Image: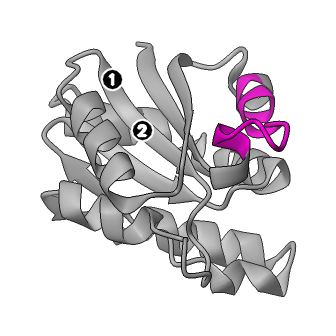
Amino acid sequence: MSFQIALLVLSDSRSAGEREDKVIPACQEILQDTDLHLAHTAIIPDDRQTIVQELRRLVLNPNVSLVITAGGTGLAPRDNAPEATQEVIERPAPGFAELLRLKGFEHTPKAMLSRGVAGIAGQTLIINMPGSPKAVREGLGTLLPILPHALETLLGMASECAGGT
C-alpha cells in the first residue's frame, strides 16, 4: 500500500526567497523507493495562523495521510509549529516526537531543544520536525520503519498490532 504525504517547510527566509530551500530535496531523496509519496510541498512563513490554515486545508484532503512540517520547532519567538499543530490536532501521538528527540540526541545534544509535537486530525497524521535538511533525513530515516504501519492503523487497514501469542 502506498500513502500520499505533504511536506510543509516553515521558514520566513525561505518563503521570502531570501534563502535556498534544501529540505524538500532531502525529503524527496529519503522517500524515493518507499511507499510514501510526496504529493504536496509548500514553503510558508513561520506564522502561526498561516500554519494552522495550511494544516487544516491539508487535513481536509482525503488523499493526504501524513503531513510533515519542517522547521519552527525550536525556542525562537517565531518558532510556531508546535502551537499551530496543537491547534489543529484532535488526538496527540507523542511517541513520534519523543522518538525524534531521542534518536536526534544520538547525533547532537541540540535535538533536545526541539519542541515538536505529533498528532492526528481526522485521518491525517501530523508530525513536526526540525528544519534542517540533515534533521529531516535523520528524522525520516528513524520514522520510515514505523510510518506505513502507523498510517494503516490510522486508516483502519492494519492487521493485529501485537504480532505474537
Q: In the depicted view, which residue is nearer to us: 129 or 101? A: 129
At label 2, the amino acid type is: Val
Instruction: Give the residue drawn at x 62%, y 57%.
Output: 71
Residue 26 percent coordinates (x, y): 80, 34
Q: Residues within 10 Å of mark 2 (few under 14, many from 20)?
A: many
Instruction: Give the residue drawn at x 44%, y 53%.
Output: 127
Residue 107 percent coordinates (x, y): 87, 72
CA separation in Å, label 1 and label 2: 7 Å
- Determine whether 24 is above or below 34 in the image: below
Tags 1 and 2 in contact by the CB under 8 Å rule?
yes
On whether residue 3 falls in the magenta region, the answer is no
Q: Is residue 9 left or right of residue 96?
A: right
Q: In the depicted view, which residue is nearer to us: 44 or 38? A: 44
Name the residue that disc number 2 marks: 67
Q: Taking the image as drawn, is residue 164 in sight?
A: no
Residue segment shown in magenta:
14-28
Name the residue that disc number 1 marks: 64
Q: Which mark identifies residue 46?
A: none
On whether residue 19 falls in the magenta region, the answer is yes
The quadrant in which the N terminus is found is top left
Circle 2 SS class: strand
At label 1, the amino acid type is: Val
Q: Taking the image as drawn, is residue 77 in sight?
A: yes
- Determine whether 38 is above or below 153 in the image: above
Circle 1 SS class: strand
Query: Which of the 4 image quarters holds residue 58?
Result: top left
The quadrant in which the C terminus is found is bottom left
Q: Is residue 162 left or right of residue 14?
A: left
Instruction: Give the residue drawn at x 83%, y 43%.
Output: 19
Residue 131 percent coordinates (x, y): 69, 56
Query: Which of the 4 image quarters holds residue 17?
Result: top right
